[in-house]
Image (tube, helix red, strand yellow):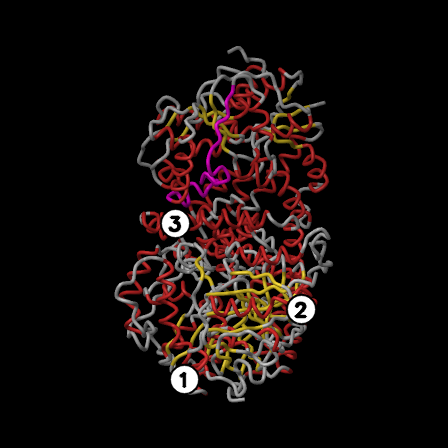
Amino acid sequence: MRIALFITCFNDALFPDVGQAVVRVLRRLGHEVEFPAAQTCCGQMHFNSGYRDACIPLVDGFTAAFAGYDAIVTPSPSCAAMVRHHHATLAASDAATRAHPDLQDRVAAVTPRVYELTEFLVDVLGLTDVGASFPHTVAFHRTCHSVRLLGIGDRPERLLAAVDGLTLSPVPRADQCCGFGGTFAVKNADTSIAMGDDKVADILSTGAEVLTAADTSCLMHIGGLLSRSGSPMRVMHLAEILAGPGPEARR
Amino acid sequence: MTGKVPADAPARRAEVLARIAAALVDRPASSAVPRDYQHRLPDHVDVLDLFAERVADYRSTVHRTDAAGLAATVAAAIADRGIRRLVVPGGIPEGWLAACPAERIGDDPPLSVEELDGIDGTITGCAVAIAETGTFVLDAGSGQGRRVLSLLPDRLICVVTADQVVGTVPEALARLEPARPQTWVSGPSATSDIELERIEGVHGPRILDVVLVDRPG
Amino acid sequence: MTVPAEPVPPIHATTRRPLPTFRGTPPFPEAARTALADPQLRANLRRATTTIRDKRSRVVAEREDWEQLRLAGAAIKDEVLRDLPALLERLERAVVAAGGVVHWARDAADANAIVIEVARAHGTTEVVKVKSMTTQEIELNEALAIEGIDVWETDLAEMIVQLGHDLPSHILVPAIHRNRTEIRDIFRDEMGKVGRPAPADLTDDPKQLAEAARRHLREKFLRARVAVSGGNFAVAETGTIAVVESEGNGRMCLTLPDVLITVLGIEKLVPTWRDLEVFLQLLPRSATAERMNPYTSMWTGVTPGDGPQEFHLVLLDNGRTDVLSDQVGRQALRCIRCSACLNVCPVYERTGGRAYGSPYPGPIGAILTPQLRGIAHHPVDKQTASLPFASSLCGACFDACPVRIDIPEVLVHLRAQVVEHAARSHRIPTPEAGSMAAAGWVLQTARRLGRAERLASLGGRVVGRRGAIGRLPAPGWAGAWLRRRDLRTPARESFRAWWRRTGGRDDAR
């Protein structure tokens, strides 16, 4: 099985540790991972902000970079959802202009092979225990796109529950959005922060040592609030916990 | 008919219809409506039990009786609610009120709203009742009368017979005649307008008794 | 109708107070800031939305066929939109055959003129009104006030809003932003100015408040000659109109007066009598979280000897055909005004409804208001253009919608329309469009991205401390982020640089 890592532009620039953790987990499970160097971005920020035309070259670039792999694994549910739900529509809207030949066919070939990390581990590899150990109490934040757009359900919780020494501490009002929302976080900063403050209060009420989620974007928002308030709670991507003990705390 | 139609009415009508036609120029695709939702309750459900339970959930009072006990049950409900003057729509079977302790007031000639507003209570039959939702439907038929009779007096007693109770909303609609004015009643008047908490009793009857007449034996 | 050339605020004939208006609401981020600063409002909203969310989850979970009902509801509404001309004509024939009069209104002015004409023909100086979103949309109360006709809102929450000289903030519970104590004060101070006063010893017990409303409105119901309502559903096949309510104020308005005028959006149809079986199950569970609402009234034209003996149905466009013309946006016309999307929306929960500057707040308002104001066809004002961005795209609204309106999809679609209007009307791109274009250019090739990452990393090291950028006065989006949140600095070495250096083999830690 040829596995490609789709790191996402956001993690590439801001959270390379997350990509390294994904590589480590998969390698420990006996799988080689390649990093197609031509990859850049799935187009989500442009798409969700209304800049649809700017997305089409990115869709084109995505299909070119990831053509020929059996599985394309990403540590971002929100980017996986963008590819799965919108690349085909964008390619179809481009079909009339013929600006990018065969784009629809290429999207149709690549898209079904894109997996969010927990989907790949649980559904493709059939695992919940990845052999990690993490002796801490952990609060897990269910990101909206992972649950509502991608439908990954409780896969992350099942993976976390199998980690040696880890105690999951349930977050109240877990279905509530943290308020990140991409450019919403800056265009409607006051509302975003109000939502984030409530989320932080719910997370702190768990008394957990570590906050984790399957997506770094929400964690950056919640972590930014925690960091500013001087909270000692550590913030880690799920992959960093699955990769084993000892990763750096991140904000 | 007093309300006269303004002069440009035909032009306005034509313009709205033309705008709609223009908006639909892409001819949206047609697809069948999937109707695989529940139409009937499972056979093992006792619709009378369920109806009684669901009506009670709305904090109205359910009295179960049979044909033999009906007059006494109605009389007791009238007495318990302190109804001294009772509106009796045309067509109410005489047997229901055989023991009625209240003064009966008919609606022929029609009562004025002021008169109705001064009366304690009303008794009514119904057209159909729905177990799943605890609803009974008035359709101004025999034993029910005008819609306003069940609206202004503060206490309402509705007699529902076993053969009138269906399981579901689809079954009820199939039994009803669309042209008749209808009032679907599910519990007493209520509101959730203050802090989204349900409280019973605003403009409609605040006290609701449902007398459910079981099948014999 | 004579309308003053310079718009003056309409005055309520009895209270002599100007009627409040949504006009002049600032763009959403600014309006939200005001709302967020009101702790009482936030507490009221949180309490109310939490209550209704839990109740709705319970009654929806009770139905194993909920998804099938949603699919049927969406399909029936799509059929309505597809066959709208024929269905409207069918409805018209059925209503006329049953003794009603049907009017067609292109816009708010048409509809208001029709209502005024009917009211005047009966020489009335007041009308009682059933809660109706459509008449709020057309500002009927304002139009009637200019003609010296008083409107009495009879729904409890609408009455609280009206007595409080306030604006509604929720589709179903317009006074959701008020708690019981505030309501008590409004009743005590205002009821006496327009009719029967509240009892002197009124407390904030909701039962007492409801009793005060009952007594206050009873005299108005008994003397009213003309009523105005909206409608939840109109059955094209039979000409039947349905109004779904709880309190009985609807029944009062629909049965006591001599004349009834119903103002109905053209999308409110269902094709057949049978189709009600879907919506009478979807609506109460989604709206008030009940198996069934206390009262549903249905009538077909005029019934001799029972209820109003004159019935007018006003079919209203007012921008709906603009919505219909948009192939993605038209799904907003499926809406049955249940407000489940408001109740689950995390943005609405914080800001309340008035921040949306329209009678239609919350997620559905964010997609309906801009479309009704013509966003598909021409640039819109700043407030309207801000609405599609008033969402974190969390998707809770779509999950809750009983007719499966994909609100996030429409929001993103409308955002694109805002961006396209801006591109067409600005010769120089807006700062946002400029940044997006630059980002798009950078992201087109891995080489450009790699270079940008190295630059960003250097920049981050200049302003950051220990891997994070803290409080820092910065313009634009950076400033908006940093006001309350630290920002992670770009990594010293990006993932792609690390991979190029190590081939992905450097995991010695």
- Which amino acid, by three-letter code, is at mark 1? Thr
- Which amino acid, by three-letter code, is at mark 3? Pro
User: Residue C241 location in percent, x, y?
Assistant: 58, 72
Q: Which residues are magenta?
A: A166-190
Q: Chain of mark 2?
A: C
Q: Is residue A188 magenta?
A: yes
Q: Gap between marks 1 and 3, in whole Å? A: 43 Å
The residue identified by callout 2 is C273
For residue B95, say whether it is visible: yes
For residue C423, say whether it is visible: no
Report the magenta stretch's main SS. Answer: loop
**In this picture, is C191 found above or below B29?**
below
The residue identified by callout 1 is C124
Q: Gap between marks 1 and 2, in whole Å? A: 35 Å
Who comes first in sequence, dot 1 or dot 2?
Answer: 1
- Which amino acid, by three-letter code, is at mark 2? Trp
Mark 1 closeness class: few <14, some 14–19, many ≥20 residues within 10 Å = some
**In this picture, is C13 found above or below B137?**
below
Is there one chain holding both mark 3 and mark 2? yes
Element marked by disc 3: helix
Element marked by disc 1: loop
Q: Gap between marks 3 and 2, in whole Å? A: 44 Å
Contact (Cβ within 8 Å) of mark 1 with mark 3: no
Q: Residue at the location (36% across, 64% down)?
A: C160
Q: Chain of mark 3?
A: C
The residue identified by callout 3 is C29
Who comes first in sequence, dot 1 or dot 3?
Answer: 3
Contact (Cβ within 8 Å) of mark 3 with mark 2: no
